[in-house]
Each structure stands twice: as structure tokens, then as C-alpha cells.
Image (cartoon, rainbow, N blue to C red):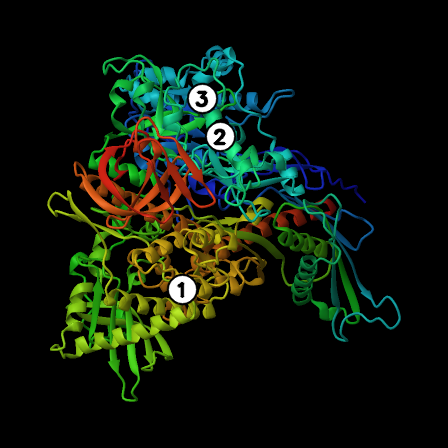
Amino acid sequence: MPLDTSTYSLALLRLDGRRWNELRRIHAQISTQAAADGSSYLEMGNTKVLCTVTGPAEGRQSGQRGGKDSEAKVEVEIGFAGFSGLERRKRKNDKRTAEMQHTLETAYSSLLLTHLYPHSTITLNIHILSQDGSLLAACLNAATLALIDAGIPMTDYLVACTAASSATSSDSDNSDPLLDLNNLEEQELPFLTVGTLGKTDRVSVLICETRVRMERVEGMLAVGIEGCKRMREILDGVVKEYGKKFS
Amino acid sequence: MEYFSLKRSNAADRGGLNLSSKVYVRSTKSGKVQKIVRELYLRQDIPCSSNLCRPCLETAPTDYTKKVAPFVLSDTPAGSKNFPNGQYLVPDTNAFLTGMDLFEMETAFHDVIVLQTVLEEVKNRSLPLYHRLIALTKNEGKRFYVFFNEFRQETHIPRDVGETINDRNDRAVRKAVEWYNQHITQAVKTRSKSQMRIPSVVMITDDRDNLRKAKMEKVPAITLADFVFSLENADELLDMMSAAQDQREVRSKKTEVFYGEHYTVSKMMTGVKAGTMHQGIFNVSPYNYLEGSVHVPAFDKSLLILGRENSNRAVSGDVVVVEVLPQDQWKAPSTKIIEEETLNKNDNPEVEDGETIVSERERKALQEEVKRAHGQSSEGKPLPTARVVGIVKRNWRQYVGHIDQGSVRSTSKTSRQQQMVFLVPMDKRIPKIRIRTRQAGELLGQRILATIDSWDRDSRYPMGHFVRSLGELESKGAETEALLLEWDVQYKPFPKTVLDCLPAEGHDWKVPASLDDPGWKGRKNLRDLLVCSIDPPGCVDIDDALHARKLQNGNFEVGVHIADVSHFVKPNNAMDKEASQRGTTVYLVDKRIDMLPMLLGTDLCSLKPYVERYAFSVLWEITSDADIVSSQFTKSVIRSREAFSYEQAQIRIDDASQQDDLTNGMRTLLMLSKKLKQKRYEAGALNLASPEVKVQTESETSDPVDVQTKKLLDTNSLVEEFMLLANISVAAKNYEAFPQTALLRRHAAPPKTNFEELANQLKVKKGLELRSDSSKALADSLDTCVVPEEPFFNTLVRIMATRCMMSAEYFCAGTQAYPEFRHYGLASEIYTHFTSPIRRYADLEAHRQLAAAIEYEALDPSLQSKSKLEGVCKNINVRHRNAQMAGRASIEYYVGQALKGKDITEEGFVMKVFSNGFVVFVPRFGIESLIRLRDLATPEPEAQFDAENYVLKVGGEVNGSVELFEKVNVRITDEVEQSTGKRKVKLTLV
Ligand SMILES: [Zn+2]
């Protein structure tokens, strides 16, 4: 029987061999699809997502207008590959997917300089190829890259990470916050997703769907924000690397 | 435009970390096969945890608070014959599976490295053993270190093509041992150039192939037995090794099979789903070891399992799957007492040849049964009978017993010859256990603790091994420990971590004088109320106190004040965890095993007289007709004016010359309690008697002097009524505040069938009618069960009715629908335990919930989680029951001791009639005992059993008859019972 998260306290090692403050292997590329206005591919461990950006485009059909008169509307669509994850239930109108879409729409509506594109729509298409935890964080990171690729101006990078509170061992109340969860950890531990803006500590996305003890939240947030900073460096590296190819 | 490939380069982009992956294949519910790929991050900073090693200390991981875990393995580990420089042990999976008791010994097996590979395998094979292993890694004195070899780069190995998982795991263990040896050698050498002892890292395995490969690869390895042999206390230790080891070799010689094969898990699950098989817990009758029963949801009455073949190696308590037999094979439950001891006295533990599962004597005993079953009608009606086809979960525990003298070949104390003996468990429902030992001579006459290891198809009895001796049979120390072990009561002294949670002031702790002190925050000052406590004499852990006074509007204010334990015991600290494990204080005749440390239980929490104490108070306004006008809950400070015994309180109330306010308050309480009681009975509450016996002991020696049944006074029920009222009020309040997680107590209505037999007995023997359609009907009809010339008869019926009831249980509100909350016995729609937090954990949890409900303090998260609370309930339900059983067993032992050497004639009543004996209850001592036909005369007289009329006609020189409910005179002597080694009262008919 595989061990579970309760063994963390035995040697401060997580189920995949990481320490509490380590990210998984992150791999990212931009401009992966020439046909799109902007695109990216991102892996956080075995979570793999593709993102394409279309727009900003003016209302496509007559009668259908983009955003409000003064600014562009951000639309997000998330799709799952048939082989993407363990659960192959109906995904289409899944509530969780709708919530993720909504989270991304809200976050990018305020982040992007939408007033530059009145009456138009910016569409993000996210395709999930493989799921192994931290799905929302991966979507946010991939979307940020694709938007940069599309050249849509924004105030700063929006980057995201997950953080959890490790299981307490029976004889102590100590619990380490854990960074960047995989699927197994997400199933067993209370966790949150935090997104910050660029190099600042400004939190722009914070989602927590599990019950967690109040006194644990502080540590989880601190570790999550620290993780976001490292994530930003990695994404920034990807962008600059890409830039170099054309300089 | 450049072409971008989505395929990533293999170059690891993480400094120092290497990535590997582990591929699992699993099948989903729909039957498809899924491949799961998991990442593995390989690293070099996993320490060896040896205090000999400095490099590892530098790279040791820190946690969030920047702390480094201290290294575990000693720098001077113990050595042995083969490894004089000391050794670190690396057991393989089988070593733990067969030798866990050995590894748990305090005197041996220190500095052990538990490999991740092994830990995973142990978890796979046995969860209980896995938990014991985890507990060992947390025991500082034992120095067990878990090394995550699969994550360390040097010790991680992929599985070769064509290699079995077992072979791969064996290789991983050898690889880790090899690495450890090199690493430790290196560490010692860099530490000092001069000659130093370099300990060996030794693999322990019994697998021959693994040993051979280790030898080839020059990895130090030894078998568990060889290692134990090289230790000083080898004899004692070797007995503890699971018998499973030797059996492997023995088995190959014999192929005879006694029992049917168990079905596979999938076959059982399909059967259960389809309704052709049923799952339930296997219980063995206390009167007949060959008769078991399994209650399954599909049948009202329990399914009957008769005989060894049908019970197919199930041991009482196991979760089994059964198949109902064709109706022509259905049988009636036994009316005969069958004891293993008398039938199979001469079985030899050593010889298996020519043995059949069912001995000839057993077969005869059962055949007589069947004949009778088919010839009879009502009483002997055949019931659905089933056979066990598989075992879902073994519930084997450690068993206390003694060595059967007849099974010992050589009783010489000096003999070191290994022999097979029988351990006869104290619990009659457990079969004899075969045990291999080298110290049979010494173990005779001792109380022994042993476990069952296996029960194979080719073995008539289960195999087990010796754990330890508790001391001489019948000695107080051994017998007390035996019953504590049998009922799983934790009786070890509180560990330091628990005592550290106590207030630093110790006995000098006082309620703060200043009302501004934070301790007073949210507390009502009730010090002026005339509060007193009423308890059994000598009570030192005073949970509750009461007061009553007249209000100006003519109503009364009544207060129940309960020790404020939750102030001292905070959720989740070591003391709370210990208390939650213990669940309840256990009362034995001469000993109390506390749930909380003495300082709290008998002093700081205890509502002692004349001192100020924190309390949790329930205050009601009650009319003179005992109707509740309002209730209120508050934390408070009280000062009890007096601690009465029931008797003292009664005397004071009855003494008309006492006209002080305190006494008048008690009179008010008594008056109201009588009205409350009346109301409860009108609502259908049951008055069920259970014989309570008090053993008088001389305090110094605590040797029993006399035994008497407890007397009940009005003041007993005074206290009881108000405690019930407080519990009910708190239950309602907590449920209102926490509809999902309130911890409540329910008592289910008994299924009608439970009363069928008793109702029939009363009808046939006394022409009385027992109705059980509601608790009210039952209560009323119990009242009519009287025989004018025999006042005790009614009590006897109540005792028997109690045994037909379900047992009450704690539960979490969200797990039941509201109508199921009902407490049948108390006729209350909701109930909880609140009034004894010093001695019951449930009450402590209720205090915490109530404190949150009145917004005194925030609720701890552990009390918000339904699943956690369910776990708590499950545990305290078991503990509660065990505590009762242990208490009863203790009384039984002391009654036996009190009657030692005495010869008394007493009145008794026949409670149950079998075809070869009957059970008599003696009210004076609260004992019941079996009288067998063969006890009446030798040779055993002929007898005729009229099951329809519950009469046993005994012929021969006795020439008389015994019938149900009959009053008989019995002679009480004592004897040591052969089968259990317990001193028990023996009854004979006069
Ligand atoms: Zn080291």
C-alpha cells in the first residue's frame, strides 16, 4: 500500500520525495501555436496545460458586442483531454470548471488593461492535457504566458501556486505548510490556491475550498506567496529566453 | 517561424534533484486499466540519522520553523556475537510481520533502520502491524529510524525487466544496506583517523534466496532466529517469534486438511452484493463453544453457526462472510451446555495425524442436539443456519490464559526442550491456542499473555506465540492485570508528556481571588449558593453538586454544577489525547484506573466541599409541579458547603429537627426529583434492575471481607433525576447549536424478537403477559410481572429483560435522523452525557460543545469534524463497554476470593434451563452460576428435558425436577475452574 501524507512527519519528506518548500519541475514554452494570437504550454510536474489566446477581437456577429462600451471582455474556456485525468466524468458543464473559468475571467479582467480595447473580446482557450494537482494554478500561469505572447498589455505577471497544511502527527501539533501540491496531496490535505501580482506580495487570487484551521492559513499563505515569487522568476526566464531567439 | 516541439528535453532543470517516475497500473471500477504516472524526486540530502555521521548533519532538512530533527541512531549501538563492533539492524518485511512482538521488547532491538520499501510492504500486508511499527518509530528509547531509501539517489533502484516486485524490493533492501555500510564506514573514517569501532549495518531476513544473494554481494545479513540466538535472553525471545516461521517447513510434510477453503475476497464481495452471502460479526455462545451466531441485516434473528466445520476457523469477534444452509439443515439453538474443556481434554497439541476436525465426542454431542431439534416444536424451532465461507477481517487481539497442564510433555523447569503446548484462554469463546515454547515448565501455573498468529486449514487449533507472563495464577497482581488486558484497559502510569499539561501550581492551584483575572471572564459568581454534593461513600472524584432555593414567584431555582474539566484539559494536547484514548475511568473493586491524572480528578476539578472550584452550571426555574420554566447554562465558580454520602444525606433529610437552608434545599430537591421520576415513568421510562454487588474490603490489605448487594436510597434517585435532567437539557442545547456534530447518546428500541423468548417463558410458567411494542407498554407490563409470595421475582424478570435490550451508544448528531436519537430506556427523545467529565470523555466533549454553544469560547476544529467525532464515538463506545466488563470481572474475582474456603447455603432462582444443566442466580451475592447435571451426582444422572415447559426432570438418585423461575436452595463453595484457571463460586443444589 502506498504511504499517505501522514508519513511526512517521519522524515520531512513528501510522497514524491520533495521537501515542504519545493516546487515540482516546471517546464514552459510560449508561442507554441503559430495560428493563435498568443499561446503557451506549461507543465507543473505531471499537470500539463495548453493555452491559446484569441483577440482582442471586435464583436464577431452583429448584435453581439464585446465587453462594455468602455472596455474589453475576457472570456475563458477550459476543456479537458479525454486522457487528462483519473475522473472521466462529464466535464463540460462541471461546476468546478465553471468556477475556474470564472476565477480566471475575474482575475484577468482587472489585470489586463482592458480599457484599451473597447467593444472587443479577449478569449482564452485552455486545454488540459494531464492533471496532477494544482490545476487552477497551472491554468493561471499558462494564461499569463499566452497573454504575454499575444502582446496584450498588463500591469504585471499574474502567477499562482498551491499550498497545503501537512497532516499533523498524533503527538505534536506542528504542521509544515507544503508548496505546490500533486493530486494525491490535494486529496488528503486542506489546501489553497494563491495568485500574486509580479514581484509584489499583492494577492489577486485566493481560493480555498477545503476546511482549514485558521492558525494554519498564515503559514500556508506565506509559503504560497514565496512559491509565486519563484514561479515568476521561472516564467520570466521563459519569456526572456524566447525573446532572445528574435534578438 | 521556428517549429516548437512540445516534447521536453530530458535535461533536468532542477539543480541537484533528479527526477524519476513510478508507474502504477490500476483497474478502475468500470474495469478499464489505467496507467498512473507518479513523479519521484530523487535527492542526496536524506540523512542516515546516525550520530556517528557529520556530513549528514550539515545537509539535514529543516522544517518550516527551521528546526532540524534530532538524529536517531546511537553512536555506540549494542553489539552481538557476530557483530562485536555494534550493529544497526535493517529488518525486511517478513521480519516485522513475524517478529513484531520481539521488536517491541524494551530489552532488545535498538537502533533499527526501517526502510521505506519495508514500511510500504508492511502497510500492504497488515495495517495493525503497520501502526505498531509507526508507534515504534515514535518511541525515543527504541531508536527506530525510517529511511526513505526510494527517494535517495544512491539507493533508489528501478525494477528490471522481468523482475518480480518481491525480488525488486529485496534488491532495494540489500542496496540500502550496502549503501549504509559504505556510508557509515566513510563517516567514521572522516571523523577520526585513529582506529574507531565501525558498527555493521545488518539486514535481517529469513528468505533463503535473499540471504544467498546478500552473501554474494557481501552485504551483512542474518536470520531473525540466528540473531536472537546470539542474544543473552534468547530463550525468552525465541518463544515470541511468530509460529508462522517454523510452520512453513512443517507444513510441507503433511497434507491433511481439516477445514474447507475460504472463498476469495472477490467471490465473497460478489456474493454479498447479490444477496447469496451475508457479512457480519461472528459471536460464540458463552455456554456452548461450538455454537456461534452472526447477525446480518437480511435476517431478524441472528444466523446460527453450528460446529467447527461450519465456523471454519472463525474466532469470536472476526468479521466473516456466511452462506445460509439449505432449510433441511437448519437447526435449533442449543439447549445444552458444551464446554471445550470437557470434550477435548485429551487432545494432544503435538500430534495432528489421524485427527479430524470434529472429534468423535463433539459429533455425538451435536447429533443429540439435532435429533432434539427436529422432534420439537415451539422452543426448539430450527433457525436459519449458516456456515462461514470466508473471513473479511480478523479481530485477533492478545489473549490472557494459562498453559494446559495436560498438554505439557516435560514439566521440568530446567528443560529447554522446545515443545508444543496449549494455552487455554480465559475467554471461553476463544479456542485453545497452540504454542511452541522452550520454557513450558516455568510457564505452568502462570497467567500468560499470548497472541494468535495463524489458523491454517490443516490445523485443528490456531497457532500462536507466547508474549509474556503476568505472574502466578490467582495472585491479585496477575489477575488484575489479566482482566485489564482482557478488556483492553490502559493502565500504565500517565507519561510525562501528559503530566506536563497539568497546571504548574499543582495542588496549590486556586480560583483566582481577583474578579479581574482572565479565569473569571464569562464566569458567574455562584459562591453564595448553598451547594452540596451527594455521592457514594468515599468518593473523591466529585463530578457534580446541586442546589435548590425558592424564588419569590413561588417557583424554585435548581442548579446542577458540574466539574469544569474542559477548563483544565485543552483539546488536542497530550493529556486530552490520552483521555480520549482511555475514554473512561475504570472502577475495579480495589483500584481505579483514571482517565485523567489524579491532580485534576481528585483535587482541582473535583467539587470538594469548603473550597472554591470552577464549575459548569445548568440552572433551571422549575414550578412546584416540576415543570421546567426556563433553563440556563453558564460557566461559574461555586463553593460546595458539604460532601454527603447518600446515606448521610438521607439521614439529614429524614431528621425533622434539621431546619437549616442547606437541608431544606435538599428536601426541595428530593420533592422535585420524585415528581420528575413520576413523569419519566409516565412517559415510559424503564426501571431495569441489574444486580449491583458491593465487596467490602479491609482497607489496609484490601482482602475482601464480605459481599453484599447495594442498597438504594431515595437520595440515590434524587441525584440521578437531576443528572438526567441536566443531560437532557444540555443535549437539546448542543443539538440546537451543532445539528451536525453534537455528541449525543442514543438507546435504540430493541427488536421485538428480542423479547419473544422471555415473553413465552412468562406466559408458560406464570401466565403473565409481557408486551414490548413500546417502552411504555414494556414498563407497564413489567410492573404487572409480580408473584405475590415472591417479591424478588419482579427484579429477576427485570434483570432478564435488561439482557434483551440493545446497548446505548454515543453518536454524532449528523449520522442519524432525529427520530433515531431517542433514548429508549429513559424515554427521552434526545440525550447526552454531561455530568461526569472527570471520568467520561464523552462528557468532556459535551462540555466543550456547550461552552461554544453559549459562546463562552470558540469550538476546537476537532469538534467540528463529523468524521473525527465519529472516531471518538466509536472508541468511547468500546471503552465504555470494556470498562463495565472489567468492573464486573473484578467483582467476580473478589466474590470468589471472599467466598474462598466458605460453605454457605443461600436462596437462588433458576434463570435458564438446558437439557443437561441450569443457571441459578443468587440475589444476595449478585452471582449467577451454572449447575450441570454431572454436578448433581456421579455418575451423571439421566434427565429428561421438557423444552416447551422449561422443566428438567432428573432421574437417578436425585429424582426431582428443576424448572424455570423456581426458587432453589443452593450450597455455595468455591473452586478453581479448570477451563479458565479462575477461582469461581461453585453452586450445588441442596
Ligand atoms: Zn550520514
Tell me which image quadrant ligand 1 sits in: top left
Q: Amino acid at mark 3?
A: Ala
Question: Tag 2: Cα neighbours inside 10 Å, few (<14), some, or many (≥20)?
Answer: few
Give the labeled residue for mark 2. Answer: B368
Say the numbered circle drawn on residue B244: 3
Say the numbered circle drawn on residue B826: 1
Q: Amino acid at mark 1?
A: Leu
Q: Earlier in the sequence, mark 2 or mark 1?
A: 2
Tell me which chain the residue with mark 2 is part of. Answer: B
Tell me which chain the residue with mark 3 is part of. Answer: B
Of residues B948 and B922, the one nearer the viewer is B948
The residue sitting at 22% across, 74% down in the picture is B666
Task: Kindly tell me whether residue B395 is visible in this rendering.
Answer: yes
Q: Amino acid at mark 2?
A: Glu
Q: Same chain for labels 2 and 3? Say yes or no.
A: yes
To which quarter of the image does residue A200 belong? Answer: bottom right
Which quadrant holds the N terminus of chain B? top right
In this view, the mark in front (2 or 1): 2
Q: Is residue B693 above or below residue B401?
A: below
Of residues B960 and A172, the one nearer the viewer is B960
Tell me which chain the residue with mark 1 is part of. Answer: B
In this view, the mark in front (1 or 3): 1
How many numbered badges does the structure rendering display? 3
